[in-house]
Amino acid sequence: MTVTLRALRHRNFTLFLGGQACGLIGYWMQQIALSWLVYRLTGSATLLGVLSFAANLPVLVLAPFVGLIADRFNRHRMMIATQVFEMLQAVVLAVLAFAGLIQPWHIIALAMFLGVCIAVELPVRHAYLLELVEDKEDLPNAVAMTSLVANCGRLIGPSLAGLMIGWFDEATCFALNALSFVVVLGSFALMRLAPRPAGGTHPHPLPGLKEGVLYAWRSMPIRFLLVLLAVIALTAAPYATLMPALVHEAFAGNAQTLGFLMSAAGVGAVAGTLLLIARRNLHGLVRYTIAAALLSAGALTALSYSRALTLSLILMAVIGFGLLVISVSINMILQSIVEDDKRGRVMSLYTSAFLGLVPVGALLAGVLADRIGATHTVLAGGIACAAAALYMARALPRINAHMQPLYARTEASRS
């Protein structure tokens, strides 16, 4: 067994990964089809921002509370329930689209419903991984491998979506996403999980949430990493929301152009994941995170000026690489240093800091793009991303000083 594949020695994790590989291709096909359909129906960058805002606002609002639930209840059953509801959402989209009845408000409402499901799923998923691999030593590798599968879906899904939209229509993408959940639910049915021991006494929800927030804030590494992630979500990540407008504005392109550009970001993300999977330990990972933020900032700035499709494909790969390294590195660090009884709550803060703030950034980016253009909005995001990375770099010596005892404690628990 090679170092890079060691998490696959756990049967339940392998089943989980297989199901997710299929489900995430369907998810990305649906996301590309949704954004293209909204822009085709309305021609409005602001509505692209509204779509992303509606889809991700539930993550910001609900994820911290779900993290508390994830520390109390059966995570396996919660995961199955979210997959069933996500499948139903895809079925409704497909039926409305095939019937020719779909309107922008349908898309936004159903995107918000999916956002509620994802707000429940993601914090539970982060905490659920430890149950699947059983050995905490394999947890960082499991996080990286999960990200690899997610970004393979991000690589394949948009290209397939572009082809399906060109050959058929957006409804086909929704239907294929709904069918992908058959494989996802089958993977959960085949798992054999040991019963979780009943936890001890739990605080009431609000005090419990407060305890998790204070724990994260008082730990300097956790605090700095979550703040950097939040800034990236507000300023850099919204570039994806603007891609239909950017494709139209910079290249006068079509759905296939959009699909290829988003797939290029997926290529970069896969490369970033492979880099992280190959790491044997977490030492130096904070430095990787800062370097990735600077790299993303430079690529976003260059993308705003690019009018050559080939160059833009390369830049999209660099952006995908950088944002992946940032988000997954922070995930790996947090999963390894956080105390087990606060894992669900801290990972819910991670979810809120990244996906939860994306809707705010996307809404602002959409409004700004209708006023100054999508390319100038992407440029502003790149500059803000660079400023956050440079601030983090100044604090790196202090962060590393606080990280050393946490790394030592983690390594001691494995011996």
Image (spheres, rainbow, N blue to C red):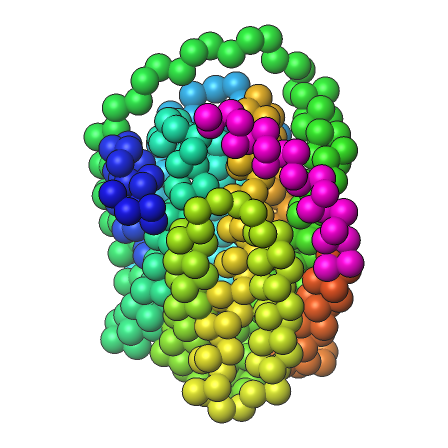
Q: How many marks?
A: 0
Q: Position of residue 319 (x, y in %)?
A: 53, 70
Q: Nearer the viewer, residue 290 or 414?
A: 414
Look at the image and tell me in which quarter the N terminus lies: top left
The boundaries of the magenta stretch are: 393-415
On screen, residue 364 versus residue 86, left or right, reads: right
On screen, residue 64 versus residue 4, left or right, reads: right
Residue appearing at x 54%, y 50% in the figure: 329
Q: Quadrant of residue 394?
A: bottom right
Magenta-drawn stretch, dominant element (helix, strand or loop): helix
Q: Position of residue 228 (x, y in %)?
A: 69, 53
Asked whether residue 331 is in view, the answer is: no
Q: Is residue 348 magenta?
A: no
Asked whether residue 314 is in view, the answer is: yes
Q: Nearer the viewer, residue 135 or 242?
A: 135
Residue, far bottom: 308
Q: Is residue 396 above or below residue 134?
A: below
Residue appearing at x 40%, y 53% in the figure: 278
Q: Quadrant of residue 217?
A: top right
Q: Position of residue 196 (x, y in %)?
A: 40, 16
Q: Nearer the viewer, residue 198 or 50?
A: 198
On screen, residue 191 versus residue 325, left or right, reads: left
Q: Is residue 399 magenta?
A: yes
Residue appearing at x 39%, y 58% in the figure: 274
